[in-house]
Structures are given as C-alpha cells and as structure tokens.
Amino acid sequence: MKSTDIRVIPGFISIAIILILWFIVAPPQGVSANAWHLLALFVGTVVAIIGKAMPIGAIAVLAITLVALTGVTNDKPSEAIKDALSGFSNSLIWLIGIAIIISRGLAKTGLGNRIGYNFISLFGRKTIGIGYALALSELVIAPVTPSNTARGGGVIHPIMKSIASSFGSSPEQGTSRKIGHYLALVNYHTNPITSAMFITATAPNPLIVKLIADATGAEISITWGTWALAALLPGLLCIALMPLIIYAIYPPEIKRTPDASVFAKDKLTDMGPMSYAEKVMISVFGLLLVLWAGVPAMILGSAFAVNTTAVAFLGLSILLISGVLSWDDVLKEKAAWDTVVWFSALVMMATFLNKLGLVAWFSGVVENNIAQLGVGWMVSVIILVVVYFYAHYFFASTTAHITAMFAAFFTAGIALGAPPLYLGLLLAGASSLMMSLTHYATGTSPIIFGSGYVSMENWWFMGFIMSVVNLTIWGVVGGLWWKLLGFW
C-alpha cells in the first residue's frame, strides 16, 4: 500500500470518534459496555470508509484486528480471534467474491461488449432506442456481475462513450447535449435499478439477506429466486420508464441515429463470430441463472435444490477446466479478494452488534420516536424508508450506509407492525435505488460523472427525480406485486 493511500485527517477523525465513544460517552441504559465498545469500533470503521481514510480492505483488516485484540465479543483471546474472523465463514460473502471472478470472463471474452453492440444494432435507429439498448445490455449481464461499478462503469460506459463520440458529442467540444448527455444519464440510472433486481447484482445485497435473516431469527431467508421474482415487475417498470423520463427532461439534440445501428454492426463484424470462450461463458451464464432460480428443485423436488454459493463455485470450476479463465485470472481479480475481506469484517461487526443487543436498542429508539406520532404501520414504513433512503446524501458507500442503518430500521418497522417480508423487500430495493442521488453515491458514479457529459446540477436534479419515481414504483407497484405473490 502506498503512502498516498492514507488520508490523515479522515483517519484522525475516525480514531477520535472511537476514543470519545469508548472512554468519554457512557453507554445508554440497557446497553452493555462490550456492545457500546463494539459500536465505537463500528462507527469509527464506517467513518473511515466514508472519509476514505484508507482503502476499504485495509480498514477492514484494522477492524478485524481491533475486535480480536480488544475482546469486545469475548474475554478469551482464542475465542475473540475466532469471532473476529467469523465473517469469512459466511457463504454469501463467497458467493459475491466468486461471482465477481466469474464476471471477469465477460470482459476477457468480449461477451459483454458483444451483448451491448447486439442490442444497439437492434434498437439503435433512434437516440431513445440506444438508451433502451444500454439499459437492456446491463440488465442481461447484471445477474452475474456483482460489481455494479464494473458493470455500469467498466462494460457499459465505454460502449456509451464510443457511441456518443461517433456522433461528435463530447464534453471537450462543448457538444455533450447532442447525445452524450442523455446517454450518460441513462447509462448511470440503469445501474441502481439493475442492482436492485438480483442478489448477485451488487456486493451489499447478500449483506441485506443476512441482516433480514438475523433480525427475524431466520424465519425469513430470502433466496436468489425470491429476490429476482419480487424485483421483476417493479424493476422492469423502472427500466421501461427511466429512458423516457430522462428524454422528457433532458431531450438530446440528435433524435434519430440510423448510423448507430451501422456503427454497432461494424463493431460486431470486427469482433467476428462468437468464440469458443464466449460460447462457454454464455453457457455458464445460463447454467447459473437456472440453478440460482431453483428450476431443478421446482421441477424435480427439493432433493435437487442446490446452494447458491455452491452454484457459483460450479460456474468458476467450469470456466477454469475449460480454460476460459486461468488461475492467474483468479489471482489477479483484486476486486473479488478485496470484497471478501471488507465484506467479512462488516458482516462480522454487524452480526455481533445484533448479538450484543445494540441493534435491538437502537431500533427501539427509532420505533418509540415514530410510535409517538400515532400513525399506522403504512405511514410508519413511509417515514422509515424515506429517512433511510435520503440519508444516502451523506454516504459515499452503499455498503457503509446499509451496514450502519438497515438492521435498525428494519427491526423498528417490524415492531411498528409492518409485514416483515414487504418491509425487507422495500428496504432492499431502496438500498440500491438510493445510488441514483449523487455523483458520489457508489463506485459507478464518479466514473460516469467524471467523463464530463453531465453537470453536477443536472446530475443531482435528475437523481432526485428518478429517486422519487423509482421509490414510488418499488413501494406501490412492488407492494401490490408482492401481495399478489403472497409475500405479505
């Protein structure tokens, strides 16, 4: 790690918060000393992540070290280190890590680009058609791309930029409004929606599954298929409306783009016929979707059910045996190993905050404040979700936001009478949809915003509009859809 990876001021702020909470602020009534001390470490960790004091993996290592050395989870050193490392045994963490490695095959084989150019060749005769082509391309690869940054910023964004450039639309020439401004906004606002549609579409989603299971004593354990089915209708509706809404608010100067279809077809010609590696990749892609959706168990019975993480390992094994990915590819996928480390630390801390009673205490505080308003559970849910959602203006990480707030707000909502699965699915969707708000909301934001096609004013305005639309669809249409499915 280079010295430039360390930001001193956010680091000192993080340390100061830990020391103040640990030594100066007394635990509230009903909170044990160990729970309060773990909260101090947790808050300091979240602040360090938000302030980017160090790379998130390095912060996670420090958090694991402090939990082990301070003994906040267990007085015995041998048990404390087991607790500190317990996050690494969580299968959902490995699901995301392995899926990120699998998604490397999309870039290595060129399959991601082929999918994008195929959609543009079909829908690219009008600018709005290109918008839908970009959205559909991301939707297709979302289930096997847990890094929403890699998907929206690494795969789709270069395609979007090449299309914009082919029409002479660039920030440098002052011609963003020709077509690039519109396409950049569609490129970005697709990302939060697809992230909300699958457990494996963004890294923090499995954390949400675990937090819901912990809060309900494992009575609610959301499967990959349940999540995908629940998000299907509201997600598709959001994708259907989003390019139209952006088009209405920020119409591009170029409306008809017959050359885009030709451009995409030329790109496909340059790529040549589908390679062996691409065929293997798309076969593995299909196999993963079938097994994650639980199709064998639906047809042949529960004896044929397969664990979702085991399915991810199966997919990776096939790619290794077939030679599509090499072991060097696996070792070089730093994002996957980084995710496994920081995810393990945050899951561990969240788990023990729950076990030590801190989450129950905080959710009780939230519940009591809302209960005093004397409103029913539906209004209570609206308040909870709106506060949770728009608090993301203060976060530069969805993971930090979810880890800090999700469990307490979910538990408080249940106590206020909300149907647990309805509330869980709504908050789960909100946890991705809140990425729409700012140019620092998630890793994809600075990549697309940094390309210069959209001003900060336009970005924030469009973000707020889409946040209202998406959240309304997820709460109303989603709620009715989940009612029809018998989820509440």
Image (cartoon, rainbow, N blue to C red):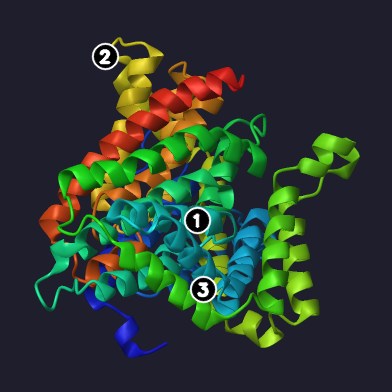
Residue at 53% across / 64% down in the picture? 115
Residue at 51% across / 75% down in the picture? 268
In this picture, residue 283 sits left or right of residue 122: right
Amino acid identity at mark 2: Leu
- Of the two numbered discs 2 and 3 in the rendering, the one whose residue sits closer to the viewer: 3
Amino acid identity at mark 1: Thr
Residue at 69% across / 77% down in the picture? 277
In this picture, residue 325 sits left or right of residue 160: right
Query: Is residue 256 positioned above or below 488 on the image?
Result: below
Q: Residue 335, which numbered label? A: 3
Q: Tell me the crowding category of disc 1: few under 14, some 14 to 19, or many 20 or more residues within 10 angstroms, Cα based.
A: many
Q: Tell me the crowding category of disc 2: few under 14, some 14 to 19, or many 20 or more residues within 10 angstroms, Cα based.
A: few
Residue at 53% across / 70% down in the picture? 114
Pick whichever, 39 or 469, lies toward us: 469
Q: CA distance from mark 3 to mark 1?
A: 12 Å
Amino acid identity at mark 3: Ala
Query: Is residue 22 positioned above or below 1 on the image?
Result: above
Q: Residue furthest bottom?
A: 2
Q: Position of residue 374 (x, y in %)?
A: 30, 9
Q: CA distance from mark 2 to mark 3?
A: 45 Å
User: Pointer 2: what residue?
Assistant: 373
Query: Is residue 463 positioned above or below 170 on the image?
Result: above
The answer, for residue 342, to whether it is visible in the render is yes
The answer, for residue 86, to whether it is visible in the render is no
In this picture, residue 21 sits left or right of residue 86: left
Q: Position of residue 351 (x, y in %)?
A: 56, 48
User: Pointer 1: what residue?
Assistant: 202
Pick whichever, 214 or 482, lies toward us: 482
Classify residue 123 by image quadrant: bottom left
